[in-house]
Image (cartoon, helix red, strand yellow):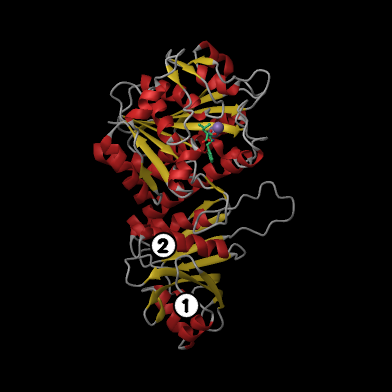
Amino acid sequence: MTTTHETTIGLRKAAAAKTRAAALVIGVTKTAKGVQPAPGPSEDVAKAYGRSFAATVKALGVKGEVGDVTKLPGGDAVKADVIAVVGLGDADDDLSLETLRRATGAAVRALSDSATIAVALPADTPERIRAIGEAVLLGGYSFTRYLSADQPKPVEEVVLLTDLARNKSAQEALAIALVVGRAVNTARDWVNTPAGDLDPTRFADDAVALAKGSDVRVSVLDEDQLARQGYGGILGVGQGSDRPPRLVTLSYQPKRKKAKTHLALVGKGITFDSGGLSIKPAAGMMTMKCDMSGAAAVAAAVFAIAELGLPIRVTGYAALAENMPSGKATRPGDVLAMYGGKTVEVLNTDAEGRLVLADAIATASETAPDLIVDVATLTGACVVALGTRISGVMSNDEELLETVPTIAERAGEAMWPLPISAEKAEKVKSSKIADLMQHDVERYGGALFAAAFLREFVGEGIPWAHLDIAGPAFNDGSPWGYTPKGGTGAAVRTLIQLAAERANSTG
Ligand code: BES
Ligand code: MN
Ligand code: ZN
């Protein structure tokens, strides 16, 4: 049993119908003859319910669509007060882990007022247990810190009913799920915290505080140190704000064996993006507290990788600044001297993310890591290209461009490759007065231009992938599956999965 927030999550081998709980979650699939209970414990519950189960779910209009939740009174059939029937999609399709996660997340979201929840979904492999475990935490998330009224009590206990309750791999799978789920929720908390409260200093302080009692070493460069070391990008973006920028480095090294591979993670950490002097219209600014989602993902992932004790060296960089207009702000037309010496002509102060990332990517390159991955809510253009549920992947390495989306998929996240065109790469170098041009006046292909710019700061011969999470980082719409409103924790699971797979493949 492990406790998180106030919810205890554990495995139990028990008959679903005889399990005492406020709510019992079962799954149904769509068939030609109407909905059917999913194989396993859901079937047992339907049987205990009796012959009226089929008629009841039909009368209630249960369709079995993934994530649809319908509540039935438990009655005398089961020991739970409520049965939550969740759709698992087509019976003919193999039940994917993502379907299981979405269904679990939707069910837990619908049962936030239940003190205890028993989950009787197919949990017959460690992989499925991990998927359900993660989704319980992700779907159960809510951000209530700023609500003054009495809050409904959080769910006290969730038990996953499984025959594998005493199986070591199943228990390990749940333990991993809890670390991963908590990491995503940590990133969500950071993103959801209003920018008025979360400035670069506070974010850095939070990272330092989290490092206590973990195997992560955190160091922070303040504005004076940044100035002495020539961090023109981070300082140039941060100088319009009264609240100074920070560069936070989070280092983890496995204890037992020296790691064979070194992964560098770089996150965009704009605690608020007003656009600066190239100010955004009101509507575009509304969600811009989310502009530190990349840094939140990187920091949360490094702590999780350390907690999991993965045999890989990881260094995370959170490039933190607040992008504000003021008499001190960088002007369009100004030239910044970036970390490492390259000069950049700033043409639009709202294209600030690439400036802070450039400094951090150049810093990461100095340690010659085996791979650099940066994560950023970088461009609206990427959202235009891929929508709000798919992140863009750009890279200087053909193989990474293919593998990163597949790694993301295994982690339960959607990412898609985009090219860095020669045309954009050329434009980046077309400034008349500086080494590089920061902004392309042509709107089209803005995600590619930004990536072409970043690539200039990657050290010679270092494989690099850039994740543009501008779409998925913040859910402006309704909650769905295990995705809440607000901060989503995008990329956290992919970064952990990437570290785990790299650690494995290099021994
Ligand atoms: N933080 C924004 C990108 C963004 C947009 C994130 C929507 C999340 C949702 C970024 O700093 C930005 O302002 N980008 C500009 C770049 C442009 C000026 C070249 C954009 O996309 O409009
Ligand atoms: Mn911007
Ligand atoms: Zn931004």
> Is 446 placed left or right of 235 in the picture?
left
Q: Foreground: 336 or 7?
A: 336
Residue 372, percent from left and from top: 36, 30
In the rendered structure, find residue 100 and report the number of the disc placed on it.
2
Q: Quadrant of ligand 2?
A: top right
Q: Secondary structure at mark 2?
A: helix
Please provide percent x and percent y for residue 419. Answer: 34, 37
* Residue 507, image x, y percentages: 25, 37
The answer to the question of whether label 1 and label 2 lie on touching residues, with beta carbons closer than 8 A, is no
**Residue identifier under label 1:** 17
First-in-chain label (1 vs 2): 1
Q: Is residue 255 above or below residue 56?
A: above
SS of the residue at dot 1? helix
Q: Looking at the image, is 177 positioned above or below residue 238?
A: below
Left or right: 411 as drawn, with respect to 147: left
- The crowd level at tag 2 (other Cα within 10 Å; few <14, some 14-19, many 20+) is many
For the point 39% across and 58% down, the residue is 98
Amino acid type at mark 1: Ala
Q: Residue furthest front?
A: 442
Splitting the image into 4 quarters, where does residue 215 fall?
A: top left
| Relative image position of residue 261 (x, y in whole percent) | 29, 31
